[in-house]
Image (spheres, grey):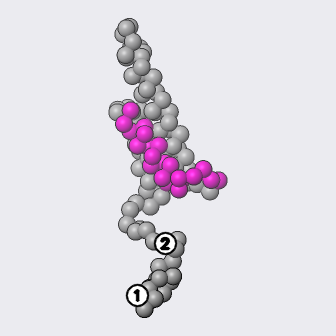
Amino acid sequence: MMTGFGNGTRGHPRSRGRTWQRTGPDRATLGIIGTVCAVAGFFALGIVLGPVAMFCGWQSMGRKWSPNHSVPAVIALVLGAIDTLLAVIALAGAATWGNGLL
């Protein structure tokens, strides 16, 4: 029997573009989660929540910069980048000989 090249043992073989499992969160949910993480990162744990927000925003945008992306995804990506940058600056300022950034 030939079981390759689309002649599989199933009655309806899967298409090539839909072979992954679709059990994870959808793109809109990832955008909202990233936005919440970015806003919370300004108040606490910015060095952790900033990259998490950037990751969620990037995944929500479909891992590419295209003109048809949602607003929460862009907000999560931008605020996460700002949050991460501020946290790195604060950590660099705290590592100096003085009293830190403030």
- The region drawn magenta spans 47-67
* Residue with the mark numbered 2: 18
Q: Position of residue 78 (x, y in %)?
A: 53, 39
The quarter of the picture where residue 8 lies is bottom left
Q: Position of residue 9 (x, y in %)?
A: 40, 87
Q: Report the residue that reaches farthest toward the left.
A: 45
* Residue with the mark numbered 1: 9
Q: State the CA–CA distance, disc 2 to disc 1.
A: 18 Å
Q: Foreground: 71 or 2? A: 2
What secondary structure do most residues of the magenta stretch adopt? helix
Task: Decide: is 60 above or below 50.
Answer: below
The quarter of the picture where residue 44 lies is top left
Q: How many marks overall?
A: 2
Left or right: where 4 falls relative to 46: right
Residue under the point 37% across and 16% down: 95
Left or right: where 61 falls relative to 48: right
Q: Residues within 10 Å of mark 2 (few under 14, many from 20)?
A: few
Q: Report the residue that reaches farthest toward the top.
A: 98
The quarter of the picture where residue 45 lies is top left
Which residue type carries mark 1?
A: Thr
Can residue 12 be spotted in the picture? no
What element does badge 1 sit on? loop
Judged by depth in the image, the label closer to the viewer, 2 or 1, is: 1
Q: Position of residue 37 (x, y in %)?
A: 40, 42
